Amino acid sequence: MSHHRPQALPLGDSAVTIAFGAERSPELLQRIHSVARSLAAAHIPNVEDIVPAYLALTVFYDPLRASYQEMAAQLVSFCEQSGRLAESAIEPREHVIPVRYDGIDLESVASATGLSTEEVIRRHSGRTYTVDLLGFVPGYGYMSELDPALRIPRRPEPRPRVAAGSVAIAGAQTGVYPLDTPGGWHILGRTTTVMFDSSREPAALLAAGDTVRFERA
Amino acid sequence: MITITKAPPYLTVQDTGRKRSRAEGVPPGGAMDLFALSAGNALVGNATDLAGLEWALGGGSVRFGRDCAFALTGAVSEATLAGTAVAPCTATYARTGQVLSVERITSGRFLYLSFSGGIDVPLVLGSRSTYLPGKFGGAGGRSLRTGDSLALGGDSAVLPPHGFHCAADLMPHYEAGVVHVIPGTHRSIFDESAWGILTESSYRISPASDRTGYKLEGPAIVNSLGAIPSEAGCPGTIQVPADGAPICLMADAPTVGGYPKIAVVSEADLPILAQRRPGDSIRFESTTVEQSQRALKRRASDLNAIVQRATRAVRA
């Protein structure tokens, strides 16, 4: 398999973003997750945080102890090598999240997709999703890929408050709101699984690259 | 212990933030003006990363439940201790029962109150900082209210004398209103004109600005791409939504975002931007990552100079 050569760019004076490609694909994302896990396991000095995303991963470092040039060279070299590694040190985890499918948008999703509510539930719970990345709020995992028949754009106006535990969809993705926040996704149901607990270690249930199945409760 | 006898409209516990939880979607948070918080700690003999109070939007008062030293840094305020004026950036000794009253903030946005021993609230994900959107950290994850009491940690062995202050030349040039910017990760996908517009125009801080981000009012920057696949940002990242109005991410900004990033403010200059109020102007000057890292080292050595002077003042 051929790879783009990873390319480093500074994100300010305390981080390096390493781009792996220009087009989003499940394969590229998987490669980035795998490199991110290898990097985390390598415990490179002065590295503080690693944030994988769709086309790139970003490494935060201590700029008082390492220069951008040093860090960028070291990381690019690591990424090129780990592209050839078959296995990473940390394995992604598999989660099963029980859902009560009684969400406020279940009916409207059914009518927008032309499916019955029963069919919406069957298709949402009928597959395994990958956590693309975490963000938006602590513990929020963007998961792919939703059944093509369920794909609808996010709501035109976000709701000012979506309750923690709400299971929602938008576009080709699904997610679970970890906190009460504003939100524009369509809510299919809710779970009692705690997605984020600041007193827990790790606080977030999900990590990028993990897989998730939703089970009808 | 200290008690908030009259809470200002905004008051939270902040330290230097969370640097190792971004992969979980947790923003770094911490003091908006990290230099002011750190300098305040140094003035009262604390380790520079202890927690203090971040205060904004109006006056209020605090009563001391024990003898301790405190310092006011960051925004400039009119303040009194038991009726006597308190100088900024100065170690001031308070006695049990005395009340520190901040009448008003006269310039700048965030005032920091540092106390000898630091504010002792539980560590959450390695920090005492309040993260309001997540309702964690600080005092129960919320803004402080009148009547709240907070424990202080034990005094350090090196308490500088009453009246110890730091020279103005060691503080950031807040008044200048100029910050340096490094080209962002998406600089090359903007029009040729975009960098010139950003660095040759004057912008104003919009009223729509808070710990999450500062919206900037001024010449629009054409973003013909709209949204892009999300990737990590950081405090100081200037991103441009489709409407062309730039937004600078601040301490509590989400860890990832899908708007193109045209520039990132030098970390050494973030305190200057953080202290601008809605309506204030700001200018962006082009720099490189190498120059920016040198500036950050100078800032660190300025802080260290305050720590050294404080230590010498104790021995004198």
Image (tube, coloured by chain):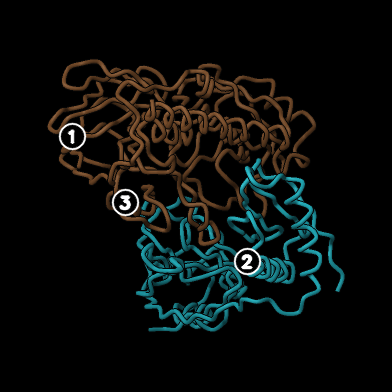
Estimate the x, y position of residue B141 in percent, counting from the top left: 31, 51
Upstream in the sequence, badge 3 or badge 1? Answer: 1
- Comparing B73 with A209, the one in front is B73
Residue drawn at (72%, 40%) of the image: B224
Q: Which mark is residue B5?
A: none
Q: Amino acid at mark 3?
A: Gly
**Label 2, label 1: how many angstroms apart (C-alpha)?**
45 Å
The quarter in which the C terminus of chain B is drawn is: top left
Chain under numbered label 1: B
Q: Residues within 10 Å of mark 1 (few under 14, many from 20)?
A: many
Q: Which residue is mark 3?
A: B141
Q: Amino acid at mark 1?
A: Phe
Task: Tell me the shade of chain B.
Answer: brown
Q: Residue furthest left?
A: B97
Q: Which chain is cyan?
A: A
Q: Residue furthest right?
A: A2
Residue drawn at (51%, 32%) of the image: B303
Residue drawn at (42%, 29%) of the image: B310
Which dot, 3 or 2, sits closer to the camera?
2
User: In this rendering, do the residues under marks 3 and 2 share a single chain?
Assistant: no
| Position of residue A155 in the picture relative to residue A52 (left or right) | left
Which dot, 2 or 1, sits closer to the camera?
1
Q: Which residue is mark 2?
A: A40
**Label 3, label 1: how many angstroms apart (C-alpha)?**
23 Å
Q: Secondary structure at mark 2?
A: helix
Can you say whether B26 is above or below A120 in the image? above
Q: Which residue is mark 1?
A: B64
Estimate the x, y position of residue A160 in percent, counting from the top left: 38, 50
- In this rendering, the count of numbered labels is 3
